[in-house]
Image (cartoon, rainbow, N blue to C red):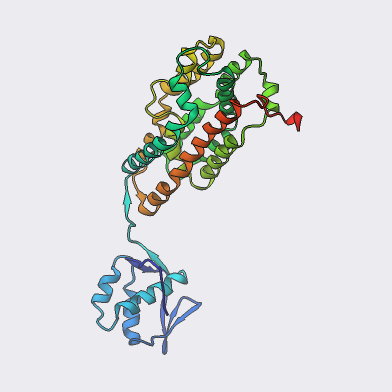
């Protein structure tokens, strides 16, 4: 039997009963094993030593008649039948170590995407009235409202996170502080004559929904990766919001800027930007296979977030109606 691309089990544990049945070994009630390449007694001893404590290397070393390739084929076959468990710990690293590596990846990706995005370049350069158009600023708040209004799509699935109680408590505390933030932004929109009814009639930009849907998918199917996105989403390390500061510098009304600042200060004062680190500090071990998956997915997340800002820039600097209304379809 030729087995390819199967990782050898380090400490195999046979999870079924072994019985001798004449010229064959009976494994449980369903499987029969016939020794062809080695004496049956050697095969039986090897199987009985698969106790989860003895390494496969040691079993092979102490059974000269059991060649390594035969042992590997045997283990692969038994594993394929679901008759083996591997009690050896997989390679792993601490959550605290992993999150620092992920943050480096995020920062490197942001350098070539979000930090160069025309929306943020405009905000950073804005110093006088007109440098940041009111329509663009309003559009940013509109899309942020859509995002926060749908936050339950991606926060709710992880509130019952079973594997780690400390992480679950952090998430529930975070959600209780986040709940209702869309209503704060609505006060800014009301100042520019947009009502709740208007927003209910409005369709988010495709880029906004893409980000929401991706986060919802990860929250449902890969919560560990979802946790790694929260630092960037919540402004890790941010002492002030560049968008709000730009609105202030160009002289926008306090009725518009004030609620935005209130929202930002809630996040800053509650340390939401540090949530990802707090979560990963509570995770003692992350398998190397999971680390590779997290790293592989991170560029996609940053690109989706960059696309969100690009969508805001394109739509709200254009001539299309401010709101994409359901009632206009």
Work out whether residue 304 can be spotted. Answer: yes
Q: Residue furthest bottom?
A: 23
Q: Is residue 2 left or right of residue 101?
A: right
244 and 281: which one is in front? 244
Work out whether 56 lies above or below 282. Answer: below
x 33%, y 52%: residue: 92
Work out whether residue 180 can be spotted. Answer: no
Q: Looking at the picture, how far across and down is residue 306, in whole percent?
A: 49, 35
Work out whether 21 lies above or below 112. Answer: below
Q: Looking at the picture, how far across and down is residue 42, in whole percent?
A: 31, 83
Q: Is residue 288 left or right of residue 204?
A: left
Q: Is residue 318 left or right of residue 59?
A: right
Work out whether 282 lies above or below 251. Answer: below
Q: Is residue 304 left or right of residue 8?
A: right
Q: Quadrant location of the N terminus? A: bottom left
x 47%, y 34%: residue: 171
x 66%, y 18%: residue: 194
The answer to which quarter of the image holds residue 269 is top left
The answer to which quarter of the image holds residue 35 is bottom left
Give the number of callouts: 0
Q: Quadrant location of the C terminus? A: top right
55 and 223: which one is in front? 223
Q: Looking at the picture, how far across and down is residue 95, in whole percent?
A: 35, 43
Q: Looking at the picture, how far across and down is residue 145, in whole percent?
A: 58, 26
């Amino acid at each position: 039997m030729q087995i390819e691309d199967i990782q050898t089990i380090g400490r195999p544990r046979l999870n079924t009963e072994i019985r001798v049945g004449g010229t064959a070994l009976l494994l449980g009630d369903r499987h029969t094993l016939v020794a062809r390449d080695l004496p049956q007694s050697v095969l039986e001893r090897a199987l009985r030593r698969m106790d989860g404590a003895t390494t496969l290397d040691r079993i092979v070393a102490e059974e000269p008649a059991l060649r390594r390739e035969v042992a590997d084929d045997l283990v692969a076959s038994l594993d394929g039948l679901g008759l083996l468990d591997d009690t050896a710990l997989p390679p792993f690293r601490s959550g605290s170590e992993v999150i620092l590596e992920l943050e480096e990846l995020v920062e490197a990706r942001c350098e070539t995407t979000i930090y160069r995005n025309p929306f943020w370049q405009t905000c950073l350069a804005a110093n006088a009235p007109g440098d940041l158009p009111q329509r663009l600023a309003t559009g940013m708040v509109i899309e942020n409202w859509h995002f926060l209004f749908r936050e339950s799509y991606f926060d709710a699935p992880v509130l019952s996170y079973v594997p780690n109680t400390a992480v679950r408590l952090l998430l529930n505390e975070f959600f209780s502080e986040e709940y209702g933030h869309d209503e704060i932004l609505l006060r800014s929109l009301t100042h520019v004559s947009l009502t709740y009814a208007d927003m209910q009639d409005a369709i988010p930009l495709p880029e906004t929904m893409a980000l929401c849907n991706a986060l919802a998918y990860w929250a449902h199917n890969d919560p560990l990766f979802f946790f790694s996105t929260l630092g960037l989403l919540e402004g890790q390390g941010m002492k002030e919001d560049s968008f709000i500061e730009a609105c202030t510098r160009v002289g926008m009304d306090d009725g518009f800027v004030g609620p935005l600042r209130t929202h930002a200060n809630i996040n800053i004062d509650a340390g939401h930007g540090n949530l990802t680190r707090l979560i990963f500090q509570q995770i003692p071990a992350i398998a190397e296979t999971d680390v590779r998956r997290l790293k592989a997915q991170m560029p996609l997340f940053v690109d989706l977030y960059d696309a969100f800002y690009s969508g805001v820039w394109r739509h709200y600097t254009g001539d299309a109606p401010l709101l994409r209304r359901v009632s206009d379809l």
